[in-house]
Image (cartoon, rainbow, N blue to C red):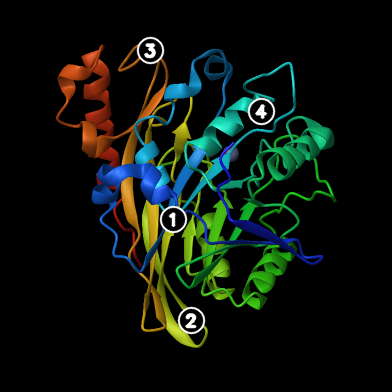
Amino acid sequence: MRLKFKYILLLGAAGLLLLAAGKAHKEEAGGQEAEAEVALEPDTLSVFILGDVMMHQKQIDADYGTFFKYIEPRMQAADFCVANMEFPLGGKPYAGYPAFSAPDAFAKYVKNCGVDAFLVANNHITDRGLNGLKRTVDYYRDSLQIPFAGINNAPLLLEKKGIRLALVNFTYGTNNGLETQNPHVSLLREKDVAEAMDSAARTGADFIVALPHWGKEYELTHSPAQEKWARYLINKGASVIVGAHPHVVQDTAHIAGVIRDSLHTVPVIYSLGNAVSNMSAPNTRLELAVTLRFVSDNGKKRMLEPQLHWMWCTLPGRLTHSYATIFVEEWKDRRNEWRIPADYEKMMEHYRRISKAAKNSDR
Ligand SMILES: [Zn+2]
C-alpha cells in the first residue's frame, strides 16, 4: 500500500487531524499531462472536491476499476482530493439502497485513485447502525489510514505550501434518525456547527472550508434553508461552502460576509451532485467537481475563484463496460467513441441546460 501522507498527527482530545506535506509524490504520479491540464502556479494550493460517491447494488456487482479511471489524473494532481462517501462499510452482505453497506475494497479503490480525505457526515452513514458507523471509522483510521471529516465536530486540518485549511462537514440528518455520541456524526444544527466552526477558528487555519450535506433531493435550485445555513456558516468564518446531497447540481452564488473584520464575498456551491452512482432520476448523471485554489503572495494568503468541472456518469455499456465518470470538456468532441451515441446526446443536453441554470445566483 502506498503511504500517501508523510505524517498524520492526532492533536489532543479534540481529535484534530493535521496533515502535512501531503502529496509530494503525487505530481510525479499524475504525470505531465495531468500537470499541464491543471496548470497551477507553483505556490497555489489546490483542493479537488468530488460530490456523492454512491455504491448501489448494481455498482457493487460491477467492475469498479473504471469508476474514476478518466478523472483520476486530476484527482492525483491536486494537492488534496476530497470526496463524500455516502455509505458505511458495514461488512457482508453488501447492499445498495436503501440501507447501504459497501465493500471495504471499494473505499480502498477510491483512496488509491487519489482521494486524501473522506467526508462521512451524510444521511447514509448510519445505515448499518452504530456498529456499522464504528466499523467504517475504524477502517478508515486504522486500515486505510485516511483522514476524514464529519465526526465529533472535529475540523480536519490540511496543510501544504504554507497554507493551512480547516475542513468542516455536517449532515442535515440520517435516514434512520440514529444519533450516536461516540463516534458522533456532525449534524447541521446550531450546537454542532458552532462547536466545529469555533474549533476550526481556534486552530488558526488560514481558511475554513465548509462542506454541508444538505438541501432537497433532485431540486436544481437551492432552498431557503440552505441559504440560511450558508449565511450562518459565513458569519462563523467559512471562506467557501461546497455542498452535496441533492444528487443533482444546484446553482452557485456569492454571499457577502465579514471574515476577521474584513468584507469578503464567499463562493457558495450549493450542490455538486453525484461523483458516481447508478441513479436514473432526472438530472442525476450530470455532476460537478470543484477545484479550490489558495495562494500565498509574500505571506499574504488569498483564495482564488473556484473552478468548476462538469462531469457525466456513464452507465455500463454506454461508453465502457462499467460505470465511468468523465469530464464533459474532455469528451464533448468524441461522440464516435460512445457504444451508445444516445448517451452522448443526453450528456450534451444535460450539460447545456444545467450549466446555464447553475450560473451564479448572486445577491
Ligand atoms: Zn445524501
Q: Of marks 4 and 2, which one's residue comes earlier in the chain?
A: 4
Q: Of marks 4 and 3, which one's residue comes earlier in the chain?
A: 4
At a point 75% along the width and 61% down the height, the residue shown is 15
Q: Which amino acid does label 4 sit on?
A: Asp
Instruction: Tell me if residue 174 comes above or below residue 15 in the rendering.
Output: above
Residue 231 is at least partly visible in this image: yes
Q: Cβ(mark 3) to ligand 1 < 8 Å? A: no
Which label number is shown at residue 321? Answer: 3
- Secondary structure of the residue carrying tag 4 is helix
Distance (Cα) linking label 4 and label 1: 25 Å
Distance (Cα) linking label 3 and label 2: 50 Å
Q: Cβ(mark 2) to ligand 1 < 8 Å? A: no
Residue 53 is at least partly visible in this image: no
Closer to the camera: disc 2 or disc 1? Answer: 1
- Secondary structure of the residue carrying tag 2 is strand
Q: Which amino acid does label 1 sit on?
A: Asp
Which label number is shown at residue 88? Answer: none
| Residue holding disc 1 | 79
